[in-house]
Image: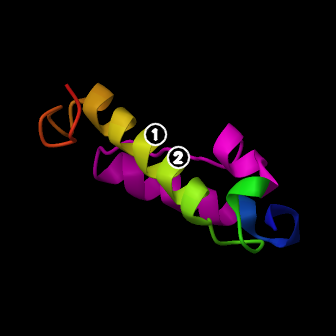
């Protein structure tokens, strides 16, 4: 699907601008193993249950590692 987005560069430039303005991380999952596996999607844009579970676990890990979420709130130890 990414290849069909003609203004993808513009969109991500705007995302980076907003992230910098508000001093928040921007995590682009475009090239992640989760997003590269068709088995994680039920159509070209939406994760299936397995993909959503993998994405949620990775996002929670990143939030904890970045200090934006405490491990106890993320359900990790």
Which residue appears at 49% of the width and 44% of the height?
Answer: 27
Residue 53 as seen in the image, left or right of residue 76: right
Q: What is the crowding at mark 2: few (fewer than 14 residues within 10 Å), some, or many (at least 20)? A: some
Residue 58: assigned label = 1
Residue 54: assigned label = 2
Element on which disc 2 rests: helix
Which residue appears at 40% of the width and 58% of the height?
Answer: 18
From the top left corner, tell me how far across and down residue 2 is, in percent: 79, 63
* Residue 46 sits inside the magenta stretch: no
| Highlighted magenta segment, given as a residue range | 10-38
Instruction: Judge by depth and name the residue closer to the eye, 16 or 5.
Output: 5
Q: Residue furthest front?
A: 50
Which residue appears at 76% of the width and 70% of the height?
Answer: 7
Q: What is the crowding at mark 1: few (fewer than 14 residues within 10 Å), some, or many (at least 20)? A: few
Residue 4 as seen in the image, left or right of residue 18: right
Which residue appears at 80% of the width and 71% of the height?
Answer: 5
Q: How is the image coloured?
A: rainbow
From the top left corner, tell me how far across and down residue 19 is, in percent: 39, 51
Element on which disc 1 rests: helix
Instruction: Judge by depth and name the residue closer to the eye, 24 or 61.
Output: 61
Instruction: Judge by depth and name the residue closer to the eye, 57 or 22.
Output: 57
In space, the residues marked 1 and 2 are separated at their CA atoms by 6 Å
Disc 1 and disc 2 in contact, CB within 8 angstroms: yes
The correct choice, above or below, for 3 with respect to 53 in the image is below
Q: Quadrant of residue 77?
A: top left
From the top left corner, tell me how far across and down residue 24 is, in percent: 32, 45
Name the quarter where the N terminus is drawn: bottom right
Residue 61 as seen in the image, left or right of residue 1: left
The correct choice, above or below, for 49 with respect to 34 in the image is below
From the top left corner, tell me how far across and down residue 40 is, in percent: 69, 56
Q: Quadrant of residue 71?
A: top left
């Amino acid at each position: 699907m990414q290849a069909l987005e003609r203004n993808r560069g513009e969109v991500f430039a705007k995302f980076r601008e907003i992230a910098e303005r508000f001093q928040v991380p921007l995590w682009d999952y475009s090239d992640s193993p989760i997003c590269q596996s068709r088995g994680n999607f039920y159509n070209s844009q939406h994760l299936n249950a397995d993909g959503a579970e993998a994405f949620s676990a990775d996002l929670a890990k990143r939030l904890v590692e970045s200090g934006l979420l405490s491990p106890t709130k993320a359900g990790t130890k």
